[in-house]
Each structure stands twice: as structure tokens, then as C-alpha cells.
Amino acid sequence: EALWELLSIQKERKDFSGALQTIDKLMVGSDGEATIEASYRKGEVYLMMDRKDDALSVWEGLVAMNPKGSAYRLQGLIQLGEEYEKRKENCDAASVYDDIGRNSPQAPVATAARERAKGLKASGACGGSKAPKSKGAVPEDAPQDLDKTQVMPDDEAGPAEKAPPKKVPAKKKPAEKK
């Protein structure tokens, strides 16, 4: 508990080398959820340090970790998929999104991830197909908001609340004649 609090303070103060040392201490002898959270946090600190390759490497390690439905694992995979897309590594991104789609306990997250993977695969950038890249390489109808999907609560907040369903405008009824 004290080490997690120390980590939070170190991140807030931008003491990134201290934060990485604290994360390493947290990982010694831990397993399961604690290791997954520490790994996610390590990638997060590397990203704050603008060390994207190191963050990517840490988040790649989350793929093999259990439990597969861990909120920290899934959030790290979302970050990993986004980074792969920025690097135009669409097949890797699609694979990560497929994993999220299979393992997320939140239906909207799982659906968005599966759709994103489907869109990336359909772009022709995967499966050996050398289709010409279209503008943006991802179909316009593919979900573009996966990065806005949270699968874990904020550090400060309590349990994540379910997002309200999107409202579909009701069709207007024609005015009745008198």
C-alpha cells in the first residue's frame, strides 16, 4: 500500500526514475493483478518520459499475462494498439484489438475493439494482401474512439460507472391533419 502511494507521489512530482525504482520494488514477489498493474504503470511512466519504445515493450509483455480480463491489462493493450497504429503496424494493432475483444468483460469495449480489428484487417494491410493503401488506411466506418474507452477506473475515482447508452434521435411523426 505504501509503495503504491509513493509511486503516485513520484509520478505527480515527475520523479520518473524514482517511480521506475518503486515499480520494480512492487514487482518483486508480486503476481497476478499486482504485477499487471505495476507493468501497466511502468509503461505509463515510460510514456511520460517520452520513451515510447520502452513503454511499447512493457505493454507487449501484458499480452501473455493473466487474468486476461484484468482492467490494467486491457488498458495497456489499448495503449499498445494505439501505438502500433501510430507506427502503421496495423496487423499487430488488429491482433491486440482482437485480444481485447475476446477478453474485455465490458460489452461496449469488446465490441469497439472487434470492430477496430475488423476495420484494420479490411484495410488490406494484413493477411499478406498488398492492397493499395487508401486515405487513412482504415475504413471511415470503423470505430475511431477506442482510445476514449476506459476499462479501468481513474486513480482518484471509485469503481467505473457504466457509460450511458448513446441516444438515437427519435423519428419525428408527421403532423396530423384536422
Image (cartoon, helix red, strand yellow):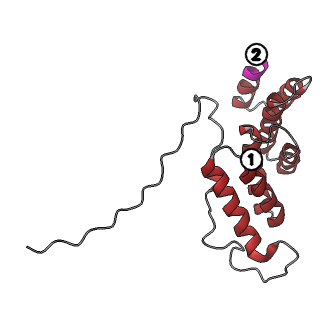
Q: Residue furthest left?
A: 178
Q: Residues within 10 Å of mark 2 (few under 14, many from 20)?
A: few
Image spot of residue 105 (x, y percent): 67, 43
Res 116 label: none
User: Which SS class for mark 1?
Assistant: helix
Q: Name, please, the residue furthest toward the bottom.
A: 132
Q: Earlier in the sequence, mark 1 or mark 2?
A: 2
Q: Is residue 162 visible?
A: yes
Q: Magenta part mainly helix, strand or loop? A: helix
What distance separates the C-alpha of mark 1 from that of mark 2?
A: 31 Å
- Read off the magenta span: 2-6
Q: Which residue is mark 1?
A: 103
Residue 109 left/right relative to 29: left
The answer to which image quadrant residue 24 occupies is top right
Relative image position of residue 165 (x, y in whole percent): 48, 50
Residue topped by disc 2: 2
Nearer to the camera, 19 or 156: 156
Graded by Cα atoms within 10 Å as few (under 14), some (14 to 19) or many (20 or more), the crowding at tag 1 reads some
Which three-letter amino acid code belongs to the residue tagged 2? Ala
Instruction: Find out whether residue 5 is within the magenta segment.
Output: yes
Q: Does residue 88 appear anywhere in the picture?
A: no
At horizontal 67% and vertical 52% (from top left) the residue drawn is 110
In the rendered image, residue 54 lying in the magenta stretch gets the answer no
Residue 71, placed above or below residue 114: above
Q: Residue at x 75, y 21 (%)?
A: 6
Secondary structure type for disc 2: helix
The amino acid type found where label 1 is placed reads Asn
In the rendered view, tell whether residue 174 sits above or below residue 165.
below
Question: In this image, 106 relative to 177: left or right?
Answer: right
Q: Quadrant of residue 28?
A: top right
Q: Residue at x 78, y 77 (%)?
A: 124
Name the image quarter holding the C terminus: bottom left
